[in-house]
Image (cartoon, rainbow, N blue to C red):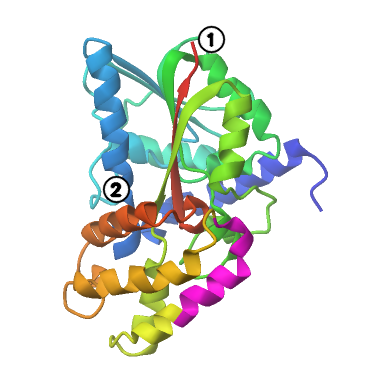
């Protein structure tokens, strides 16, 4: 039984030390790599806006940098998100796991990395234009308000935050695919859009936006596997509705169940489900991009997606 926040973080460090060598390989399926590329696109748009505002300069802190996905990409299949060799970019990264940092240095030996805890970020006030925390580190804090205060402390006024907490969907364990979020029973927090917004707003952030990635891809993938690559739309709809029934309190729109039919019809119309243009024949990027746009149009809570990207501005 875990008795303290400190003990919990020690367990997290050990988990990722053990997982470090296999980590990138565990996330190499088509849907995951497609999601990585979507994340990369959102991230680069934020980077470009900040650099335009700052005459090309950028300072960034990578909070829970893991195996160095931001500066080094994933498995040579997803390109680096940021050119850390560019002298106009100041990149700093830290992680609680020595093993993950070791893997990050294999991708790029000259990275400025250190082992640290996000509850006490080892940098002065007002140091960075952008704080990024991808793929779930924020959710391992059982005191997220403290972490958000640290984010606000080290980011400059009017700087930006870009994070990916674990979603309520991951917490449900339903049709998520592999995730370290489900390993070893370590306590963690899972977020809906409303919950993460409330925490960030109390921490002096504003203009908070949430985007979901991969709402129903794994449901379709399961159906494909079940029916030997012949997708039965009624089966998929049934599985999705079962999930919505279990997590109905997470939705932001009471008409969601009725809209599932519209979502499935759109998938069929765009030949994403029933033809060779399915996401499982390629990187999955186009599929997930269209699905994300549709889900936003239908007002589906990003907390029901496998991943949720949060962007926010620090108040002056």
Q: Position of residue 153 (x, y in %)?
A: 56, 15
**Residue at x 38%, y 74% (from the top left corner):** 261
* Residue at 23%, 80% in the rendered image: 274
Disc 1: which residue: 124
Task: Establish if 181 lies above or below 273.
Answer: above
Q: Is residue 15 left or right of residue 258?
A: right
- Secondary structure mostly seen in magenta is helix
Tag 2 residue: 38
Q: Is residue 272 magenta?
A: no
Residue 197: image tag: none
Q: Name the foreground residue: 42 vs 192.
A: 192
Above-or-below relation of 277 to 112? below
Residue span colored magenta: 238-251
Q: Position of residue 304 (x, y in %)?
A: 50, 58
The structure residue drawn at horizontal position 61% and vertical position 24%, both measured from the top left corner, is: 203
Secondary structure under badge 1? loop
Q: Is residue 242 magenta?
A: yes
For this rendering, which residue is in front, 289 or 8? 289
| Mark 2 closeness class: few <14, some 14–19, many ≥20 residues within 10 Å | many
- Examine the rendered structure and indicate whether residue 303 appears above or below residue 57: below
Crowding near the residue tagged with mark 1, few <14, some 14–19, many ≥20 C-alpha atoms within 10 Å: few
> Residue at horizontal 39%, vertical 87%?
226
Q: Quick check: can you spot residue 110?
A: yes
Element type at mark 2: helix
Tell me if I can see residue 225 in this picture.
no
Q: CA distance from mark 1 to mark 2?
A: 32 Å
């Amino acid at each position: 039984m875990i008795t303290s926040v400190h003990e919990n973080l020690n367990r997290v460090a050990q988990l990722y030390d053990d997982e470090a060598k296999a980590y990138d390989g565990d996330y190499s399926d088509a849907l995951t790599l497609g999601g990585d590329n979507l994340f990369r696109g959102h991230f680069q748009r934020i980077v470009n806006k900040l650099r335009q505002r700052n005459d090309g300069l950028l300072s960034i802190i990578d909070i829970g940098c893991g195996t160095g996905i931001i500066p080094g990409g994933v498995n040579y299949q997803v390109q680096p998100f940021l050119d850390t060799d560019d002298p106009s970019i100041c990149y700093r990264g830290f992680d609680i796991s020595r093993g993950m940092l070791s893997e990050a240095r294999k991708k790029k030996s000259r990275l400025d990395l250190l082992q640290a805890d996000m509850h006490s970020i080892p940098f002065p006030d007002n140091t960075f234009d952008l704080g990024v925390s991808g793929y779930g580190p924020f959710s391992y804090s059982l005191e997220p308000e403290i972490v958000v205060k640290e984010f606000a402390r080290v980011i400059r006024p009017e700087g930006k935050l870009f994070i990916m907490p674990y979603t309520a969907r991951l917490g449900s364990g339903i049709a998520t695919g592999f995730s370290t979020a489900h390993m070893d029973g370590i306590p963690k927090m899972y977020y809906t859009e409303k919950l993460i917004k409330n925490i960030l707003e109390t921490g002096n952030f504003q203009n908070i936006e949430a985007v979901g990635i991969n709402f129903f891809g794994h449901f379709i993938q399961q159906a494909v596997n079940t029916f030997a690559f012949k997708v039965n739309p009624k089966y998929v709809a049934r599985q999705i509705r079962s999930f919505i029934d279990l997590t109905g309190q997470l939705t932001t729109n009471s008409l969601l169940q009725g809209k599932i039919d519209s979502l499935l019809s759109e998938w069929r119309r765009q030949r994403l489900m029933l033809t060779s243009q399915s996401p499982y024949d390629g990187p999955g990027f186009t599929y997930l991009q269209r699905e994300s746009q549709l889900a936003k149009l239908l007002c589906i809570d990003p907390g029901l997606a496998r991943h949720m990207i949060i962007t926010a501005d620090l108040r002056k």
